Image (cartoon, rainbow, N blue to C red):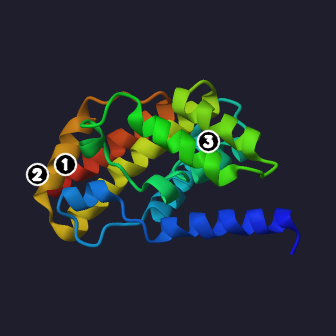
Amino acid sequence: MPADRDRWLDLLLRSNDLKTTPRTGWHLRGVPAPEGVAAHSWGTAMVALTLAEMSDEPLDRGRVLAMAVLHDLAEAEVSDIPRLASRFLPDGAKNTAEARALDEMLDGLPVQASWTALMDDYKTEASAEARLVRDADRLEFLLQAWVYRETTGNRRLAEVRTAYRDRTFATRAAQDLAEAILARWQTLDG
């Protein structure tokens, strides 16, 4: 097998770990058998595509989907460090670790510069696509919290609902969907 194919295969094998890497924040909130990072990435991609379709803004859907799929790729190396835990790390430590992991994972691949640029855009929310994908990531979290609350009865997830009541999203479509989720959640909790 040519070296280039070996590097691509290495990337695929490393990223495959995301299928079994649990979203730690759900565990910390008492959710039994939480989703994996790959499931979250798929959910983010689906929400991002939906938001793009709901948007009146001209968006590069390929860029949107690439960002959504790649946004947690580095977690194959650094694992899922939830916000609940990252607050104990020095400022910027999580982002630095993820950038180093991504750089190592993509080393020698022809997409290294372009994928790194996509992730830099995502982190800084410099483009309309990045702002939409960040909204999708946050909205997917709220959606999953509601699903877990509904399916497990876990009342500890009410803190997520409370935190999102005052959250403002960058895109109107995300704001509208968040309000719809919160309204339905209200009927669940009364």
Q: Quadrant of residue 189?
A: bottom left
What residue is pinned by disc 1? Answer: 186
Mark 3 nearby-residue class (10 Å; few <14, some 14–19, many ≥20):
many
Q: Which of label 3 and label 2 is nearer to you?
A: 3
Say the numbered circle drawn on residue 53. none
Mark 2 nearby-residue class (10 Å; few <14, some 14–19, many ≥20):
few
What residue is pinned by disc 2? Answer: 190
Q: Quadrant of residue 103?
A: top right
The mark that comes first in sequence, 3 or 2, is: 3
Say the numbered circle drawn on residue 52. 3
SS type, badge 3: helix
Q: Which of label 3 and label 1 is nearer to you?
A: 3
State the image coordinates of residue 61 (x, y, percent, origin top left): 70, 44
State the image coordinates of residue 173 (x, y, percent, origin top left): 49, 36
Mark 1 nearby-residue class (10 Å; few <14, some 14–19, many ≥20):
few
Q: Amino acid at mark 3?
A: Ala
Distance from the alpha carbon under mark 1 to that under mark 2 = 5 Å
The residue located at (24%, 62%) in the rendering is 27
Check the image and report above or below for 67 versus 189: above
Q: Amino acid at mark 1?
A: Gln
Q: Residue furthest bottom?
A: 1
